[in-house]
Image (cartoon, rainbow, N blue to C red):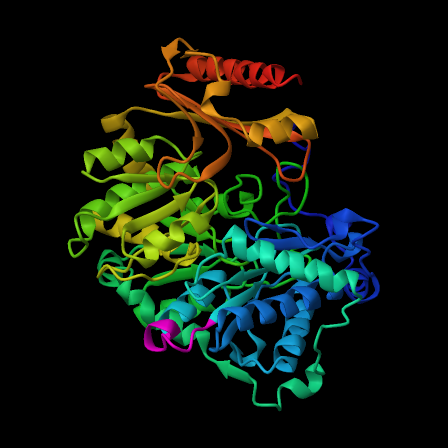
Amino acid sequence: MALHERAGLPALPEDLINVPRLMASYYLNEPDVEKYPEQRVAFGTSGHRGSALNTTFNESHVLAITQAICEYRIEQHYEGPVYLGFDTHALSEAAFASVIEVLVANEIQVVVQAGLGYTPTPVISNLIIEHNKDHPAFLADGIIITPSHNPPQDGGIKYNPPHGGPADSKVTKWIEDRANQLLIEDLADVKLFPYSQAWNTGYVKEQDFIADYVSGLERVIDFAAIRKAGIKIGVDPLGGSGIHYWPEIKAQYGIDLNLVNEIVDPTFSFMSLDKDGKIRMDCSSEKAMASLIGLKDQFEISVANDPDYDRHGIVTKTHGLMNPNHYLSVCIDYLSKHRPEWDANLKIGKTLVSTSMIDRVAKANGKDVVEVPVGFKWFVEGLSNHQLMFGGEESAGASFLTRYGDVWSTDKDGIILALLAVEITAVTGLNPSEYYDKLVEDHGKPFYKRIDAPASPEQKSVLSSLSPTDITSNMLAGEEIVSILTQAPGNDAPIGGLKVVTQNGWFAARPSGTENIYKIYMESFIGESHLAKIEKEAQQIVALAFNSKGL
């Protein structure tokens, strides 16, 4: 994709959404899921997302999804409360009201942040876990209203079961199918109670989520080390749901934390344009993060999060914005060496498309790696059962155990990953970028890239269902192929694509769920010319697989 001519520049008035029109569309546009399949409820890796403007995220969608969740809870005998949170996207507060109307009508206790405050995704996960520790027969779950880092016109809703993490595909398929049936039946079975009266029913409880979460952070992060080192921290909340958490963290733990932007604006007018010229609150994008990167010399560490705070962006004075793969490697090495109370047998969770630097770091620390398909849901069981010390995705999402080896969050937690960057700097005297440079000295320098290649719907279907025997090549970029994977080695789950590995390189190919393309991830520990060969031959290998199927 070509870089937009204004990528990295401040948004202009013409880039901003029309909020009144968007909100009117939420209530006025009615999906016709039989005539227009693209208007159906469709759960991806992080719930259902869409925009009211194109009738893919409207009141009807939210009502149907929530009713489906209520019916799923009844089937599963979940009798505890639903923890409900929402972020700062324009559609989120309206969707929040819609969810409450359905939950109350179904006589379900719902717990929300006091004063209609915003709530990050990891906070909901932590609340669910803490509640269910004390009430195993009265299980709670959660709903988070957010489209994550998506543009301002988008909305989203996701469901977290009693384990606290993202629902797996079996659960989301159940909810998706029931919600679409409700839409087809014109919401006839959806129960509704007027929002204006719901607060007086006793089914809505307000709670200080901020105090609960912030007070628990000392179990995860070494704040004493941060205070002692006097690290000066810059924080850009990116106008997201954690905006009111940072001042409490500063006050409670006495650290030198400075908010560089305190604006909450549903148009996100303060953002720099992403690489495609759109406003997107992606804290792992150098273009979207241009404003904070420009302030890097004022702080030893600067951090940011996306609107629902499940992702992290780390900016260092010496190197600027860190590559997410690099930071995951640093976290794993540091945590392996600086959590003495952890069980030595704890493992590390990584996705198939994350850097192999993680494998080298893990091996050096005597740790096993559990390699799983893309999606944080694959780490939930391992974190819950204290088998994984850390689970991370290449897209800047991760979580890890408390300092005492207890589960903290089974969803991605951008807050603790941001604070860990400060702890690393305080304890080691190296910022995470400098720490990564040391890892490169010890383990070699990886070259990583992701590209998109065209693919027809038929080719995408073939790619998602390949077997290793469909690949006839035995060499990749001058090296012998040592493994061909269509199932993840960590849990034997289908990866929905292909990964080919050599001693010093690999590529993975996965079809896009929304576009007629497939994504190719690749890495070389030899050099850029070797990476270029992997890129070329990866497409040739995939093309041969297509040809063998008559495509």
Above or below residue 270? Residue 217 is below
| Residue located 51% across and 65% down the image | 243
Question: Could you tell me if residue 84 is visible in this image?
Answer: no
| Residue at the extreme top | 478
Q: Nearer the viewer, residue 408 or 422?
A: 408
| Residue 363, x across and y down, in percent | 22, 34
| Residue located 61% across and 45% down the image | 272
| Residue located 32% across and 49% down the image | 390
| Residue 491, x across and y down, in percent | 37, 41
Above or below residue 325? Residue 500 is above
Asked whether 132 falls inside the magenta stretch, the response is: yes
* Magenta region, residue range: 131-140
Q: How many marks?
A: 0
Magenta segment, prevailing SS (helix, strand or loop): loop
The quarter of the rendered structure image containing the N terminus is top right
Question: Could you tell me if residue 416 is visible in this image?
Answer: yes
